[in-house]
Amino acid sequence: MELNEKQIQILEVAEKLFAENGFDGTSVRQIAKEADVNVAMISYYFGSKEKMLEVLLGYRMADFKIQLESILSKKTSYPEKIDEIVAFVVMRIHKNRRTHKIVNLEYSKDSRSINFEKYLQQKDENYRVIEAFVKQGQEEGVFSKKVNIPLIIPTIMGTYFHFYYNKRFYTSLHNLTDEISLDEFVHTTLTKHIQQTIKALLTYAN
Amino acid sequence: MELNEKQIQILEVAEKLFAENGFDGTSVRQIAKEADVNVAMISYYFGSKEKMLEVLLGYRMADFKIQLESILSKKTSYPEKIDEIVAFVVMRIHKNRRTHKIVNLEYSKDSRSINFEKYLQQKDENYRVIEAFVKQGQEEGVFSKKVNIPLIIPTIMGTYFHFYYNKRFYTSLHNLTDEISLDEFVHTTLTKHIQQTIKALLTYAN
DNA sequence: TAATTAATTAAACAAACGTTTAATTTAAAC
DNA sequence: GTTTAAATTAAACGTTTGTTTAATTAATTA
């Protein structure tokens, strides 16, 4: 799907508002007003509020796998690769945190009018890449074989998101006052913590 | 606040529907219908939809700290205590997962009409208990001093919630077909994974 | 039993919701 | 320059939203 400037403009406002106030908590009139377009433009361009979200997903989730494979193809040690993967994943989900948040909320709903097929397919592909990497490390005796591989991703992403969802609590614990110091904290301290965690798990687990 | 049977009945239906369809995605008429009461009863008992959620929070979050302290007062080893704490935390948040989900979503909103003061206070008290325990272990040389203590809780809870929010994805990865095998998976495999992770982090981190 | 309070109801309230319509303006193609 | 298609608009559509009202029934107290 090709997107013109106006469509991207609408999507970015929608992403912001959905993340701030939820999908149901955001009205198409709010989006239209903040994006400075007429309400009817949303139906005109995307068909419906739900389909607009689906387009947003596709727009944000692109080319993750390629960049992941690029890291794994480097000639670096296993611990170095873990550090790189974790740093990359954290950077990506932090950048796209608003879209991820919307997905987390909407995807876990029972009654959904949103189609997550493409999103799930990408998620599965990404997992297979990680799985192959860990298994390779296990075969070479670098990683512990007692690790539950499918639960590595939830550990990385879950730690980030629980921090992010409770950022008002944790920023006060860490004395982070503004948005910039939060970004910095994520890319230094939080990233380091997750790197430590995953390396400890993969290397010493028993 | 004292709650009569009918109020609890309403709260439990509300919890279920809020978790399934979101706070904004659930109407008071839905709640009233499923709880088999008149719509007006919700305003009559709780004042508003928002205040009803606040009452639900207080109802669900009680006596966590006491049970945590009870575990820590036992004369067991540090690794054993970690296992117990993780198992307890996972059990609790899994039991109260619906309420936690609502909090995760509503708390991170910018525009909130819901008061989270009591919830935050309890969260802080719980954290202080964990913090004291880890620091004690560090002083006795059992735990690594390079661990970021405030990020331990996000690692535990985040792993659980990311698994739970994406359960449709992970249950298919693990071939979990029904709700019972999911419960069992949480209390065995997932709990074990998080125990492994936290022990590895606290013991071997560098 | 009578008086009082609590619980419950159906109906109505105004406001907001997502979407559609039909008319008009702008842009592109010929 | 005329025709055709795309973009944009204000207004209206029928629903649904959370809450309130006023009347009635049930339970409690005196």
Image (cartoon, coloured by chain):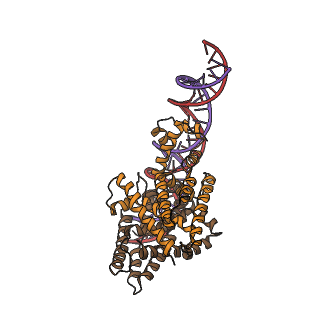
Chain colours: A brown, B orange, C red, D purple
Q: Residue at x 57, y 71 (%)?
A: B140
**Which one is nearer the viewer's eye here, A125 or B160?**
B160
- Which of C15/A22 is in front? A22
How far from the left and from the top, in percent, is residue A139? 32, 79
Query: Which of the 4 image quadrants contains residue B147?
Result: bottom right
Q: Quick check: can you spot residue A98?
A: no
Q: Is any atom of residue A73 visible in this view?
A: yes
Q: Position of residue B21 (x, y in %)?
A: 46, 51
Which residue is at 37% across, 62% downward?
B170
Q: Tell me if residue B147 comes above or below residue A29 in the rendering.
A: below
Q: Name the residue furthest bottom.
A: A75
- Please identify the quadrant where the N terminus of chain B is shown: top right
A127, B79: nearer the viewer: B79
User: Residue B67, position in %: x, y?
Assistant: 54, 53
Q: How many marks?
A: 0
**Is B160 on the left or on the right of B149, as rendered?**
left
Residue at point 40%, 67% (across, down): A151
Image position of A22 with respect to C9: above or below: below
Q: Residue furthest front?
A: B75
Position in image of residue D8 (x %, y %)? 52, 61
